[in-house]
Amino acid sequence: MKPRKFWPWLVFTLGAAYFLVPLIATFEFSLKMRRGYYSFDSYGSVFSDPAFQATFAYSALIGVFAIVVGIVVVVPAVYFVRLRLPHLRPLMEFITLLPLIIPAIVLVYGYIRLYNSSSIVPFTGSALGTDILLICGYVTLAMPYMYRAVDTGMRAIDVKTLTEAAQIMGADTLRIITSIILPNILVAVLSGAFLTFAIVIGEFTIASLLNRPAFGPYLQNIGANRAYEPSALAIISFIITWGAMGMIQLLARFAPRSAPVTD
Amino acid sequence: MSDQHFLRVEGLTKHYGTNAVVKGVSFDFSKGEFISLLGPSGCGKTTILRMIAGFETPSSGTIQVDGEDITALRPNQRRLGMVFQAYALFPNLTVGDNIGFGLKVAGLGREQRRARVEEMLKLIGLPGFEKRFPYEMSGGQQQRVALARAIAPRPRLLLLDEPLSALDAKIRVSLREEIRAIQRELGITTVFVTHDQEEALSISDRIVVMNAGNIEQLGTPHDIYNRPSTRFAATFVGHLNTLPAASFGPDRAIRPELISLTQRPDTDTTLSGIVSDIGFMGSVLRLKVDVADVRLSIDTFNANSTPPQRGDAVTLHLASRDVLALGA
Ligand SMILES: Nc1ncnc2c1ncn2[C@@H]1O[C@H](COP(=O)(O)OP(=O)(O)OP(=O)(O)O)[C@@H](O)[C@H]1O
Ligand SMILES: [Mg+2]
């Protein structure tokens, strides 16, 4: 090893160890359920738990809705700001960062105050209403990521000229967004979608305070009451999140190859 | 509706804030004409074209196409076609789907679309390319597809904003001829924006010479070149030599190719000067000759004889009827 590379390698190794050692330790521990030798018993126990299946399915479904709502809200918003109100972009940047600054607990207390069963819009009065609220909360939490993903996607295409080209051929706004803009930023939108999914699957605060049977509270519950299963669940969560990240990387390779943007 | 007054623009103005970029432009063209808007950068050509297309709202004035006032219509209601400088093909669609886009929007069935796309690809000389994606095509091919896409839905008017300026010189010339041939074949009224005077002269029926938001002159290429009505039109279109004021009076000028080194039947004036530079441009020799206090540019055909050398004394012949009086 060249001496020049010693320090960078050292820093890299320390950084990697910082992340990997706890992970490896957790993994190792999760294999120790059966005394004396390694086994995947804890994983078997997790997967066969009906509560695991139910909460995971619930969160996955909520995640899908959060993704759909997020796309429907963010894509047109970014599109119109880019096209018609470019001077509002700094404001958009700021607003979409707010969910990172405001803790989720503040957000959910706000929801509960605004939408409690004695308010004008009693979302929390029914399970369905609470689910809608939960989805809205997740859309908000994922907003910083979804916005940035979509914005990056739109930066790569010449939104204005493509819009005008479609307009002059008679297309209306809905058709332009669905058949021209969205397909061209699909990879970016999907990466936003996977980030949203990763957030929703692990989220605890909002789901717990709204008292919904989501995966996050289930994780917490298991963590407080079992020995080996929590480690197995932690590893499973990691794999899901990394899977989502890996999908983003994979999709980036399929980004539509467009002609160079000139504007 | 008769074929006259097919595209009629009256008193068109556009302000951005207090800045007037189009200052009361009017013109009137017949069906099937090929019109160029020619002028230097920033003179408002694109702005006029975009107002015709509906992408910019005029501050005042009206635009009529085929007797219909379209000034207040949205771009997607105007039934026009447009080709952009940057091609603007839809990257997610194949060539065939790009060309068929306007037809799909118009509600044509799959079979009709396929037939029209095929016809268009044949017209632009790219038969069999419908399955390709834009990124698999060269710039010139992409721009031809963009042209096919614009004309496929049979628009009333074809608008082109410097469609050739992103291409290299050779393709630029061949494609502009192709555009002109297709335009003639379809008889589609066309407005072509360019800042390249040679381009405008070579393909237009009529040219609108613009400067700083105003029309300087509107006429056939022949008129504009030979009878420029303003100083700007004279100097912007083609080369021009200002003649020595002592012998011709102030503001007199002549085209470089109208000065000869030998006498012609119509020449009646001579000047003597010293050759200061020779440029060989293939078919043309461009000489610089110092006469009194001015340097004249002279274009002669490259004959197979020994050209004059630098420092040679030469006699120049010109016809006084070729001398242009530059007005304001
Ligand atoms: N959106 C806008 N806001 C303010 N000024 C503008 C806007 N669009 C154009 N202009 C100004 O209007 C003038 C005319 O612009 P235009 O694009 O029509 O010129 P052009 O003749 O097409 O020039 P070029 O040959 O460079 O394309 C320019 O001075 C430009 O700066
Ligand atoms: Mg322009």
Image (cartoon, coloured by chain):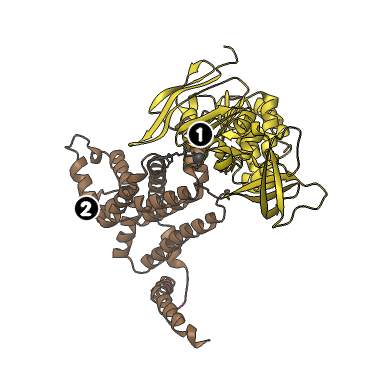
Chain colours: A brown, B yellow
Of discs 1 and 2, which sits in the foreground? Answer: 1
Q: Chain of mark 1?
A: B
Q: Is residue B77 left or right of residue B3?
A: left
The residue that mark 2 highlights is A106
Residue A134 lies left or right of residue B73; in this view the side is: left
| Nearer the observer, B230 or A38 | B230
Is the shortest distance between ligand 1 and the CB of mark 1 under 8 Å? Answer: yes
| Label 1: few (<14), some (14–19) or many (≥20) C-alpha neighbours in 10 Å | many
Residue A74, how many percent across, how many down? 38, 44
Quarter of the figure with residue B19: top left
| Label 2: chain letter | A
SS of the residue at dot 1?
strand
Corner quadrant of residue B179: top right
Foreground pick, A193 / B29: B29
Q: Is residue A206 visible?
A: yes
Q: Which residue in the protein does label 1 denote?
A: B210
What residue sits 61% from the left and 42% below the top? B239
Q: Amino acid at mark 2?
A: Val
* Range of magenta residues: A34-39
Q: Residue at x 49, y 50 (%)?
A: A156
Image x and y of residue B257, in percent: 69, 40
Q: Which amino acid, by three-letter code, is at mark 1?
A: Met
Drawn side of residue B111 relative to residue B246, left or right: right
